[in-house]
Image (spheres, rainbow, N blue to C red):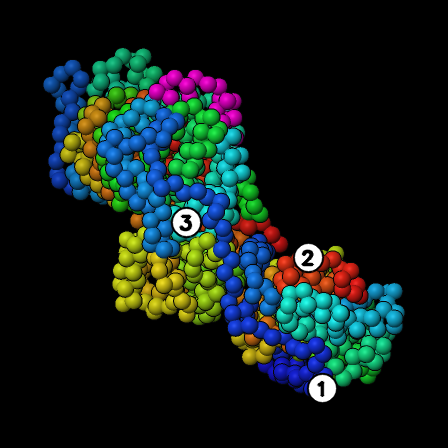
Amino acid sequence: MPAAQIKVPGGGRITIPHYPVDRVGTTERANSFTKRSIKTESKLDALYLALSMVDLTTLEGSDTPGKVRQLCGKALRPMPPAMVEQIEKEIGKKIRPIPSVAAVCVYPSQIATAAKHLRGTSVELASVATAFPSGQLPADLKLEDVKRAIKLGATEIDMVINRDAFLRGDFQTVFDEVVAVKDICSDEAHLKVILETGELQTYDKIRFASWLSMEAGADFIKTSTGKATENATLANTLVMLQAIQDFYDDRGRMVGMKPAGGIRTAKQAIQYLVMVKETLGNEWLTPQWFRFGASVLLNDLLRQIMKQYTGRYFDNHYFSLD
Amino acid sequence: MGGRALETSTAKKKTKIPQNGTVVETKSGFKYEYSPAPESKSIVKIKPRYELFINGRFTKPIAGKYFKTINPSTGEPLSEVAEAGANDVDLAVKAARNAYDKTWSKISAKDRGRYLYRIARILQERAREFAVLESLDNGKPIKESRDVDIPLAAAHFFYHAGWTDKLNYAFPGAKISALGVAGQVIPWNFPLLMAAWKIAPSLATGNTVVLKPAETTPLTALLLCEIFQQAELPDGVVNIITGAGATGASLVSHGDVNKVAFTGSTEVGKKIASAIAGTNKRITLELGGKSANIVFEDAALDQAVEGVVQGIFFNQGHVCCAGSRALVEESISEVFIKKLKRRMQQLRIGDPLDKNTDIGAINSFEQLEKIKELVEVGKSEGDFFEPNTRLPSKGYFHKPCFFNNVSAAATISRVEVFGPVLSVQTFRTPQEAITKANDTPYGLAAGIWSEKGSKVHEVASKLKAGVVWANTYNKFDPTAPFGGYYESGFGREGGIHGLSAYLEIK
Amino acid sequence: MKVLKTIKLFIGGEFPRSESGRSFPINFHDSEKIYANIAQASRKDLRAAVEAAEVGQKSWGFMTAYNRAQILYRMAEMAEGKRHEFVGLLKDTLGISDKEANKQVDEAIDAFIYYAGFADKFQQMSAAVNPVAGPHHSFTTPDPVGIVALICESHFDFGRLVSNIASVSASGNSLVVVLGPECPAILQPLAEVFATSDLPKGAINLLTGHLKELYPHIGSHMEIRSVSCQNEDTEILYEIKKLGTSNMKRVVPRYENVDSLKAITDFVEFKTVWHPIGT
């Protein structure tokens, strides 16, 4: 990706730098995080931390208010109280309280239902927007999508970049769309910008799109919609983390990271946390700066937490399946 | 730069009712430290005493002398090992000669291959045991012995097993024959891997072997003898004798050794070459280096930093091809140094058996002292940096460190430290980088970091080094020839090129 | 009356006398009659030849293999033009028959052509793409060692001499050839062949002199990377090997014919290059 000049609102230009990324080296480094062995106390900590970072997501054509209601319940109280009691009785001591997840993430048409259940709680309400997942709608409709979502109570917007414009080299359009969405979000909502790494494919493009999005005002950058053939991987997340690091060094602004899609197990989640810890550092290890876009991950985290306490494995039926 | 887009945004502040409470972190937990994750030692049984392996049997040394081998991460002895005298060496060479004459040169090439395949397989089966023992005796992180040393050693046997009955294809049109008895002396940095590098091609080409492991790391080579027994390798085909420099000297200068192979320091290599100059013994030497790792301004910088870190700190820097001189294009040196420091801060130093250890123990007290001495010299030659990490209270450990802004003439940029010590110099043009990289009597390896293909090829062709890693570093494979130019030694090990070192070709 | 020849050294494409001013006479094989006076190289002449070889190697070693092949072939053409001179010289100084002399010259010309043809082929025969177990392209290619000293002390045979020179030269090495007492006069026409074949100056240098005087300097010279030894005296060979450890010289005894690919690859280093494969 050659460097590109971008016009910014209010006049002036910025440069999105040329920053090549080597795929093999990146993959090697990413794989090195899977070799970390996180045990005992630090494992329990990591499991709790990961749980608090989950954007519990349902993005299906079949989503209904009933489904969303159940999901919100699970988000607020991931572990059934009866189960907690039973475990505490078995091990003869209190377990650390299980936190709520970070957010619930839904389609725009389910915001109203989710808002009803989440309003006044610590759980954020994230809505995908801008014609998620493809982004293939005219710009005005995409902005309308965002305005409506915020009006209905979304506190976080997960937008997609315009891959049509990006892949034909029209970076100004990509940039302008993010800026426009950010304008609407203002300080009403957090903006997560989805690059859809599976469609960009090369790490050079992922790196470039990360920088472009951050320059345009992204609060978070996010790997993928979960709808592409390849979603979050340790390697593409690493490329984005390194972009965040450099952006912070250069601009002095922290940007959050959200890998999404394909993170299904506690083991994977811990690998991501290890990677964040050993690249961006502890400052980013909070739900404010790091999220997992996931659904089945939550139950695996719960199972692993209970395993840490009891030494036994549980199957999903001991938790609620939503 | 400008526009509102750059402003930091703040999330909407809302009244929040905490459910179930918030995350409670423990002070020893994930964010602060990884809990210890030690690999179990129980898989390996270390005997209180090891004998010499001569003619298929463990044999007491004639003089009855033994020496201790130390666990460098604690400084405590692991076991005691026989010291072979000249008469023991003679017995071992006789056993190898006898095996060469009576069995090894008589059996079919196919069967030679079968033995090597067996050895490879058993080694794979017992990999964990070897990895633990290697880390105990050498001090290297279990992560490396488990993922690099042992699998590569097995791969070496596997690769060479396939050559035994295809040697004629390797040298078409030439007449080839085995040399006879190979006397081999190996270093302490990759004890089992170096044994495999030496033994596998010798056996594949039809030679028999007397091998001496380093005196500080004899245990995995001795454990390998058990595998030879399990594989029913004919007696005397491989003999392992232990001891220090004197044992090695009597081995290489033994009159009935046809081929000498040595990996180790250039200083000792020169002595060996000189000692056998008055003979017709064939020789291969894999010696020291002061390899340059060149980072151009158009490099993929994060991978380059990682490559420089892996290039010098892999195996505590006890690597002959370690990228101990970083040459960084001046235009990016500031950001490079910043990233390098940040990355080094993440290196975990400690118990070699902990699965999360990146940098283990220095192999011996003597080596640690040598490194410390050179680091002291370096402090007057450049800007010193070491990460803010703690070292274990016992054992032989040294922090990874580097010296920035050193001159090409500085001791720290010329002398092989053989430890986790990097020197950093800058350059301005590709030509200057090439000149600086080649400005050493060594010629083992070099690294190039640039995303411009034509530049990579130009620089690679002009570097006087036997191995050039472009946009990668410290990659090893049994199929890829390895070895140096100039004072880094003679000959190649691995690949089709490595075979010729063990064959007479006419 | 015939003009008495004085044979001079061949260094850096020039024909200097020895800096020492020394020369020695060569007689016709069967008489006390002087065939020619010939310069006797000193330690300093050796040093000058190595310096010239260093310059020569930079052009010769970085030429395309096709170009080197053309020049080696040109040597054959030039040698053919001097056939009578070579034959006469071999007969006069060695006392061999016309048939034998012609045979040696034939073999010498053949060797130039043979290695001209090899200059752009040994790479593919000795290089490799290594099937490494990972996402890397790894390949191994030959690289000339640099400056090679070639000692021709005994077993003189014109065909063998040219074969040894051409095989070492074909890969891009530069040479300092020391011709011993058996047929030093060959220097003159051979140097003329090299001087008229578009060979870069210094790529091949020819000296005559006493090996006993020169070999310690060959052995210990740090710029000489390799030595091809065609001499009977193993004392000298061993001594050169021993001295050569100062810079880890590759010392190759070369009295008998070897596999011709090996004759080339004994004087190259193999370089293995790795590069990741990934978008």
- What's the distance in space between the residues labelled 2 and 1, CA to CA? 38 Å
Coordinates of residue B482 in the picture (x, y in percent): 43, 41
Magenta residue check for B401 = no
Looking at the rendered structure, the kind of residue marked 1 is Lys
- What's the distance in space between the residues labelled 2 and 3, CA to CA? 34 Å
Q: Check if mark 1 and mark 3 are on a common chain.
A: yes
Start-end of magenta stretch: B98-117
Coordinates of residue A286 in the picture (x, y in percent): 61, 74
Left or right? Give the position of B503 relative to A52: left
Residue B136's tag is 3
Residue at image position (24%, 42%) is C246
Residue at image position (46%, 62%) is B348
Crowdedness near tag 1: few (<14), some (14–19) or many (≥20) residues, C-alpha within 10 Å: few
Decide whether the magenta segment is chiefly helix, strand or loop: helix
Q: Nearer the viewer, mark 2 or mark 3?
A: 2
Residue at image position (13%, 33%) is C23
Looking at the image, tell me whether mark 1 or mark 3 is earlier in sequence order: 1
Residue A246 in sight: no
Q: Which residue is mark 1?
A: B14
Residue at image position (48%, 28%) is B231
Coordinates of residue B184 in the picture (x, y in percent): 34, 34
Which quadrant: the N terminus of chain C? top left
- Disc 3 sits on a residue from what chain? B
Query: Please, is residue B24 above or below residue C244 in the view?
Result: below
